[in-house]
Amino acid sequence: MSALAAFMITPLLVWIGLFLYLLYIDKQIKELKK
Amino acid sequence: MKAKTSSEPGIIEMLARSIAVLRKDLVCEFRTRYAINAIVLFAVTTLIAVSFSVGGAGISQPIQATLLWIIIYFSALSGLSRAFVKEEESRTATALKLAASPGAVFGGKLLFNILLLFMLEVVIVPLFVGMMSLQVKGWLLFVMVLVTGSIGLAVAATIVAAIVSKANAKGALFAVLSFPLLLPVLITGIHGTQAAISSSVFMSGIDDLKLLVSYTGVMFVVSLLVFRFIWED
Amino acid sequence: MVFKLLLGIWMSAVIVVAFLYAPAAEGFAQPDAARIIFFHVPNAIVAAIAFIVAAVYAVMHLHSRSLMDDAKSAASAELGLVFTALATITGSIFAHIQWNSWWNWDPRETAIIILLLVYLAYFALRTAVDAPDKRASLSAVYAILALPAMVFLMFIMPRVMFSLHPQDTLISEGKLDITYRLVLYPAILGFIGLYVWLFRIRTALAEIKLKMRRN
């Protein structure tokens, strides 16, 4: 794997993590609204 | 009797009411001399400190210009920040609300602060020029930059003083709030003053003057529009 | 929901492309490190947009007296603060890599720092007022006052600072290569999308809090 691709993994994982977390928060808010 | 803020009158009347507010403040100030003392004391002390450590020892022109404006700026901070606090403290705010429209109140306070700054500068600028052995090549530009810059400082300081008077008493709040609003005046003022020191050509500072005038104008209008939201309860 | 999924894929694509498609920038001290631009520039743009949004909701609040408008103004300011901090930090990292100095006071750096100060001042004000309606109106007033100041600082800075201290700006690397632009613009859009989502979440939370207080 090229060095560049290796460097890319971190931001990608960070973003995916953030993304899932935001979806989770969205769900929590939907339940609070009820 | 309800303390409802009066409605806005025409311009001439607003000017007249502003002057009335101004006179009231002048009379109060004349009795206590609180603000003018604070301002002049601060400025002179700072000037002495600066002059003592650096004075005339061939410091560069940008630094000379910067020092002058720093002294003026910090004096403004110390002297203008309480423009509205005394109203809140002595409960005269209610009477003021009945007597004059928000625009007139702001106008009066602003005029007072402008006067205060001018009185300070009449004292401190000659002292500065003398103690720092400043050679100013363009006097007209020098004076005009100071005048317009001071009005700009006064406008921002007045509106921030109004905001701070409604917040919980915190000394640092005024400095924190006013700094971003005053920075354009400071930067342009310093730049224009430096131009005036180094060159006898009036036009070399014309851009700075234009900037100062337009910024002051914009801030004045916005402050005027926005003041009544601070002033009314 | 579609918007969010689209955003998720979009940003992932932007990240991949930023590393694998965009070439290393020539003329840079560390050509590959220039990729931080794809993160740094969108941050700064979102920071500015967030500020304008906060000012707009401030005006709306003064007109409507609605605490919800104030909550939205504050929410945007919160996000703006975060993005400004990120922009400042990434900018500083880039400056260190490129010019070996963490801070230069060049026009753009100064502008972003001032924006940071404005945001901090805004929140200092908010913490200094207890009554919610007073806090709302005072914050709104300040946000509006800060707008002309920001406009002047963004546009005075280049003119004045250049003549005093001639310095490299962050844009002096010459025109932006087309491949870079192809990645940068979508990156900017992606970050704006992220901001919108975060704004909606924050606002929803504020709305719930307001309702709870009323009961």
Image (cartoon, coloured by chain):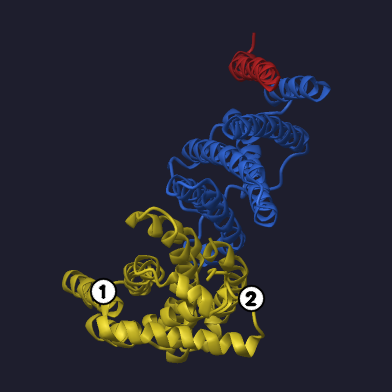
Question: Circle 2 sits on which residue?
Answer: B7
Q: Residue at 29% across / 80% down in the picture? A: B36
Chain in red, by letter, is A
- Say which amino acid is labelled 1: Ala
Position of C31 with respect to C196 (left or right) is left
Output the chain of dot 1: B
User: x, y percentage for residue C28?
Assistant: 58, 37
- Say which amino acid is labelled 2: Ser
Find the residue positioned furthest to the left.
B52
Find the residue positioned furthest to the top.
A1
Question: Circle 1 sits on which residue?
Answer: B38
Query: Of marks 1 and 2, which one's residue comes earlier in the chain?
Result: 2
Residue B192 visible in rendering:
no
Q: Quadrant of residue B56?
A: bottom left
Q: Residue at 22% across / 82% down in the picture? A: B131
Colour in which the image shows chain B: yellow
- The secondary structure type at the circle numbered 1 is helix
Q: Residues within 10 Å of mark 1 (few under 14, many from 20)?
A: some
Residue B197 visible in rendering:
yes
Disc 1 to disc 2, C-alpha distance:
35 Å
Colour in which the image shows chain C: blue
C197 vs B161, nearest the viewer: B161
Foreground tag (1 vs 2): 2
Q: Residue at 48% across / 42% down in the picture? A: C99
User: x, y percentage for residue B133?
Assistant: 25, 84
User: x, y percentage for residue C11?
Assistant: 72, 24
